Image (cartoon, rainbow, N blue to C red):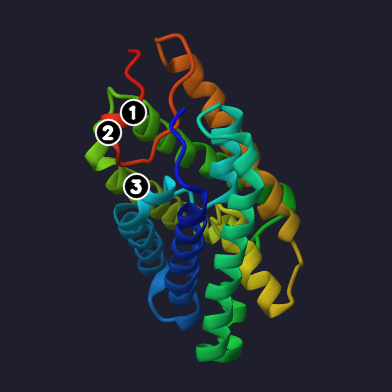
Amino acid sequence: MRTLPLGPALVAEAVGTLALVFLGCGAIALGDVGTAGVAAAFGLAIMTMIYALGHVSGAHFNPAVTAAFAVGRHFPAANVIPYWVAQVAGAVAGAALLRLTLGDALARAVTQPSGSDGQAVVWEALLTFFLMLVIVGVATDTRAVGQAAAIAIGGAVAMGALVGGPVSGASMNPARSLGPALVSGDLSGIWIYVFAPPVGAVAAVLVYRYLRPSEGTPVATPVLDSSERDDTS
């Protein structure tokens, strides 16, 4: 298992998650970009941050992704909590910057279900499942096109936001929801976005393990570092 230097990796995770929240949630807070604009903002934020920081931290920017990689033995279990702390800190910082610059408009970016809690749980789990299936495929399998990883993952985020946004808010990321919720003080429904995305992400890793024809434990690698990726297939 290839180990990335933890200090720089944590800073990268915080910065990348800050960018995701500031840009994606900022698009929501502005209130005039529409569903497609919000989806594009989240997708582009993820894509550009993966290209910028993927080689430093693996570009998780999402506690659900970190948890799923650890369950799938693509990531050291000892680094899970430090990554979570960095991601939530980055999300809170991004939300705080939105509150500082846009005031109460941040409340628009607090993730809330449009229907029932049960409906939101199912949608969040499924949307995160699809996202994680893309991530684990392009990040751990040499048969996938590594240099297109950022585009594929950004596209999956945008697709989830475009389709699922009107239903569950399409968080797919506990940190993305925790940041605005903590800064705004509105924690209603937050359990949905802390619980459902990790369930979907872990399920995706387990399904991909079955789909992968090779045996053995894949090597943990940054998304874009194709030369270091597992080559057991």
Q: Secondary structure at mark 3?
A: helix
Q: CA distance from mark 2 to mark 3?
A: 10 Å
Determine which of the numbered discs, if any, sits on residue 55 in the image.
3
Q: Position of residue 224 (x, y in %)?
A: 30, 41
Sequence-wise first label, 3 or 1:
3
Determine which of the numbered discs, if any, sits on residue 226 in the image.
2
Disc 2 marks a residue whose amino acid type is Ser
Identify the residue at image location x=67%, y=58%. 115
Label pair 2/1, CB-CB below 8 angstroms: yes
Identify the residue at image location x=43%, y=68%. 19
Q: CA distance from mark 2 to mark 1?
A: 5 Å
Disc 3 crowd rating (10 Å Cα; few below 14, some 14-19, many 20+) is some
Pick whichever, 82 or 95, lies toward us: 82
Q: CA distance from mark 3 to mark 1?
A: 12 Å
Pick whichever, 132 or 97, lies toward us: 97
Determine which of the numbered discs, if any, sits on residue 37 in the image.
none
Q: Secondary structure at mark 1?
A: loop
Disc 3 marks a residue whose amino acid type is His
Query: Which residue position holds label 1?
Result: 229
Q: Position of residue 163 (x, y in %)?
A: 45, 53
